[in-house]
Every structure is written in C-alpha cells, then in structure tokens.
Image: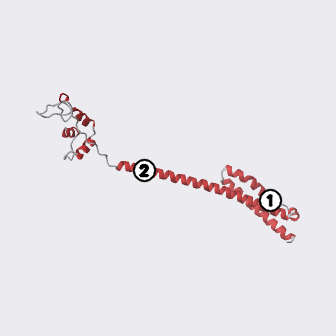
C-alpha cells in the first residue's frame, strides 16, 4: 500500500473519530449524569485521535488510523451498553406499570364481586325452651303487652330478633317461606316471628 493511501485512510479514520466524538457529546447531553460521565473520557480520546496534523499523518499514518479506530469502537461499545441499560430500565418501568395496573384491575374486580355478591342467608334461629317463669308477653315493638290466653312469647327469641337488622329479618322470613314480608317494618317483622 502506498503512503498516499495510508495517509488517506488515516485521514478518514481521524475524521470519523471527530464525527463520533460530536455525536457522543450530543448524546451525552440527553443522558443522565451518571452515564454522561462515563462517556466523557471516551469523547475526549476520540477528539484527540481525530485532531491530528499533516505531519503526524505523513509520519505515522497507521498509528493514527489504529488510534482513531480504537476510539470509535470504544465510543460505540460504551454507547451501546448505556442504551441497553436505559432500555432495560424503561422495560422494567413498563413491567412495573403493567403489574400495578393488573393489581388495580384485580382490586376493582374484587370490589365489584363484593358489591354484587348475594347476601348470605341468615341462619334461622330456633327458640330455646325457657322455664315458664321467664316468659313475658311482648308486643311487636318489644314492649310488654297483653297477650291472649295460651300465647307465650320467649324473651330470648324476642331479644335476638330485636338485635337483627330489617334485611336479616326479611331474609329469615324468606327462608321460612313466609309471604307478604317485604313491606313490613321491623316491629311488624318481629311480630311475624313471635
């Protein structure tokens, strides 16, 4: 290979090193500081490899070509690694966002299921036999009232019925197969069971 050809190749490599240094400098401005600091010495080396004199090109063209090529390769490798790391971080953020969205969606589905879940049936409470002395006549509202002969009301059942909600009382009426309970008040529902 002639010396002119060697000088031309060295000049091309030096120009490429300067171009790579400029592109890397532009890229480093958009990178986080941590990554920009890693590129800084490589950019400096590429600029140095690209800034050569004619005399240096004539005296040592192979060394200049090798130095410029090495600087370009080092910059390209470092840039590729940084881009891979940033891509992995972006993918991880997307995956985290998807997981978070999935959790939110699951939570919403669970909430909908809870809202639309049927009301559990209230167990039917059977009155317990109490001694005859403890029986007190009770009206529908839970206050003492006169009862007809032979009608005895269990106070423990009455107390249990008083503690139940209207919805639970209606559920019990439904479970027992009673009719006409849907419009009754709490007192009327208790009277229905007593």
Q: On the picture, is 73 further left or further right than 7?
A: left
Label 2, secondary structure: give it.
helix
Q: In the image shown, does 57 or 100 lie closer to the viewer?
A: 100
Label 1: how many Cα within 10 Å (few below 14, some 14–19, many 20+)? many
Label 1, secondary structure: give it.
helix
Q: In the image shown, does 36 or 108 lie closer to the viewer?
A: 108
Residue 122 rendering spot, x and y as whole percentages: 28, 43
Q: In the image shown, does 113 or 22 lie closer to the viewer?
A: 113
Residue drawn at x 81%, y 62% is 66
Label 2: how many Cα within 10 Å (few below 14, some 14–19, many 20+)? few
Residue 160 rendering spot, x and y as whole percentages: 26, 35
Which of the two labelled residues, at mark 2 and mark 1, occupies the earlier sequence position?
1
Which mark is drawn over residue 108? 2
Residue drawn at x 54%, y 52% is 96
Q: Which residue is mark 1?
A: 49
Q: Image quadrant of residue 11?
A: bottom right
């Amino acid at each position: 290979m002639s010396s002119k050809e060697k000088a031309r190749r060295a000049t091309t490599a030096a120009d490429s090193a300067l171009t790579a240094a400029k592109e890397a400098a532009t890229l480093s401005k958009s990178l986080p500081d941590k990554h920009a600091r890693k590129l800084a010495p490589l950019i400096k080396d590429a600029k140095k490899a690209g800034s050569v004199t004619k005399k240096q090109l004539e005296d040592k063209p192979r060394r200049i070509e090798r130095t410029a090529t090495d600087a370009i390769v080092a910059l390209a490798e470092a840039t590729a690694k940084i881009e891979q790391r940033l891509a992995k971080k972006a993918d991880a953020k997307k995956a985290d966002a998807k997981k978070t969205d999935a959790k939110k969606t699951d939570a919403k589905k669970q909430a909908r299921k809870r809202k639309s879940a049927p009301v559990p049936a209230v167990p039917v409470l059977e009155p317990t036999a109490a001694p005859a002395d403890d029986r007190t006549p009770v009206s529908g509202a839970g206050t003492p009232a006169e009862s007809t002969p032979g009608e005895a009301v269990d106070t423990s059942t009455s107390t249990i019925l008083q503690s139940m909600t209207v919805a639970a009382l209606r559920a019990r009426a439904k479970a027992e197969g009673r009719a006409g309970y849907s419009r009754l008040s709490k007192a009327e529902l208790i009277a229905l069971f007593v």
